[in-house]
Image: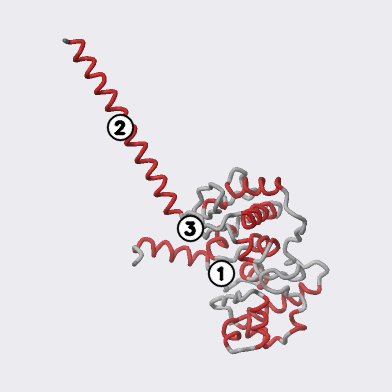
Amino acid sequence: MRRPFGLKLVIAVVVLLSAPHLAGQNASTFFRTNCYSCHTIGGGRVTGPDLKGVLDRKDRAWLTNFIRNPKAVIDSGDSYALELMKEARNVIMPTVPGLDAAMAIALLDLIEEEGRLEESNFMGLQLSDTPISDEDVFRGQLIFTGRSRLLNRGPACISCHSVSNTGLLGGGRIGPDLTRVYERLGGRKALATWLLSPSSATMGSVFRDQPLAQNEIPLIAAFLEFHAKNSLEQPAATGATYFLLLGFCGVSFGLGAIAFTWRRRISRSLKSSTIER
């Protein structure tokens, strides 16, 4: 099915606005925008490995080549790259268009410098591994649904996403269903790190200037963890399904209102005829 021209134009504008502008971007900004959602420096493994000490594990030439085009290195059969992919549950690190050798080297310098610090600026959130509480789940749902306004005034999660078996009417056609995102990303820490610095084109552009507050992230993660562990094995209703249901209800209500109005008119007409007789 061909997309309408207007939709193509909107998509093109969103991509242009959200794409990372490499020119003029320093290594720290680039790392936070493109790498931080999957990697920490000194904070432990998330989706990808902790990068502290990575220069002790592989030389700069190999790392520069891998950073610029991970898939090509994996496809070459490189044993270390294949091991990294296996540890990441077969998630392949994306290739960032336009990432040149100079930026790759700058990133390695940043990783090396941050790795020397007692506490890196890219350690990620340090979350407790204790079981989540009912209060955390409830507060997370309030934030997810927008009933509690985000501190930095960003849009509520439900504006674009749905979670099945919650009765929540979310924007499932805009963003993916998040019922299983806790499992897809590999647990609480990886989910929280993604929320701290989302690297997807849409979320990155939306939350760049209105990021989630660090005390909001564990609560949203708790809500999503709870539903991943307790949801039934059934797909969430899509946005289209919701619109069809709402449309059906609207039509039914409209027809009912019309029938009620006409019944009253007929009843009045009959009474009027009886009186005249």
Q: Residue at x 57, y 82 (%)?
A: 71
Going by the numbered disc 2, the residue's amino acid type is Ile
Q: Is residue 202 above or below residue 84?
A: above
Residue 277: x, y in percent? Answer: 16, 10
Precedes in sequence: disc 3 or disc 1: 1
Give left or right: position of 59 versus 12: right
Quadrant position of residue 70 = bottom right
Residue 86: x, y in percent? Answer: 65, 78
Residue located farthest toward the left when viewing the structure as drawn: 277
Q: CA distance from mark 2 to mark 1?
A: 54 Å
Q: CA distance from mark 2 to mark 3?
A: 35 Å
Mark 3–mark 1 contact, CB under 8 Å?
no
Q: Which mark is residue 54?
A: none
Q: How many numbered circles does the render carry?
A: 3
Nearer to us of marks 2 and 1 is 2
Q: Residue at x 76, y 72 (%)?
A: 114
Residue that mark 2 sits on: 258
Give left or right: position of 221 versus 127: left
Residue that mark 1 sits on: 20
Precedes in sequence: disc 2 or disc 3: 3
Precedes in sequence: disc 2 or disc 1: 1
Going by the numbered disc 1, the residue's amino acid type is Pro
Residue located farthest toward the front when viewing the structure as drawn: 233
Residue 100: x, y in percent? Answer: 59, 81
* Residue situated in front as seen by the camera: 102 or 87: 87
Q: Quadrant location of the N terminus?
A: bottom left
Residue that mark 3 sits on: 174
Nearer to us of marks 2 and 3 is 2
Give left or right: position of 146 versus 217: left
Quadrant position of residue 10 = bottom left
